Image (spheres, helix red, strand yellow):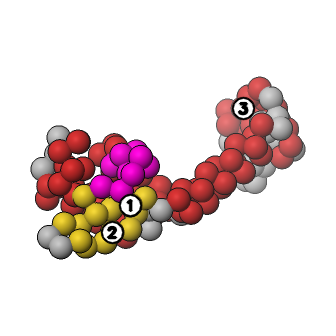
Amino acid sequence: MEAILAALADPARWRLVRLLAERPRSVGVLAQLTGARQPQTTKHLQTLERAGVVTSQRTGQRRVYALLGTPLRDLAEALNGLANGTARVSGPDGTFEPHGISVGLVRLAAEGDERADGCS
């Protein structure tokens, strides 16, 4: 999961993923569409392939890349799980209440000598 997030964090790679979501494309076409040089595009695509986001196939002199849906669906499911966990509470104070932590208590502890978690 971390490798996928790291690969998608780069704006250039994110642009390539969005283009590949439309249809498989060759490195040359992707380079042209993004306005990047072909060696840069190849390096980005190799990073995405190592992360398991895309796959490639050689066709003669060309290498064609395609987006793999399963890793992105798995990532979306993990993110939705995190988002749904926070949706059950409302407001900044409500975020801490399910964990038995009062925001006021944390603020008081932060001002004093004690640690915010109650340990000294």
Residue extending farthest front: 60
Are the residues flagged by discs 2 and 3 in contact, CB closer than 8 Å?
no
Residue 107, labelled with which disc?
Answer: 3
Residue 66, labelled with which disc?
Answer: 1
Are the residues flagged by discs 2 and 1 in contact, CB closer than 8 Å?
yes
Residue extending farthest top: 91
Q: Which residues are magenta?
A: 16-25
Residue kind at label 2, given as amino acid type: Ser
Within 10 angstroms of label 2, few (less than 14), some, or many (20 or more) residues?
some
Within 10 angstroms of label 1, few (less than 14), some, or many (20 or more) residues?
many
Q: Please give the residue where the numbered disc 2 appears in the rendered image.
A: 56
Please tell me whether mark 3 sits on a helix, a strand or a loop. Answer: helix
The image quarter containing residue 86 is top right
- Magenta includes 23? yes
Within 10 angstroms of label 3, few (less than 14), some, or many (20 or more) residues?
few
Residue 24 is at least partly visible in this image: yes
Q: Residue at x 43, y 49 (%)?
A: 21
> Is 23 situated left or right of 112 in this image?
left
Residue 108 is at least partly visible in this image: no
Name the foreground residue: 24 vs 78: 24
Eye-nearest disc, 3 or 1? 1
Name the foreground residue: 100 vs 66: 66
Please tell me whether mark 1 sits on a helix, a strand or a loop. Answer: strand
State which tag comes first along the sequence, 3 or 1: 1
Q: Could you tell me how far apart the alpha carbons at marks 2 and 1 are, in whole angstroms?
A: 6 Å
State which tag comes first along the sequence, 2 or 3: 2
Considering only vertical position in the picture, is 19 above or below 77? Answer: above
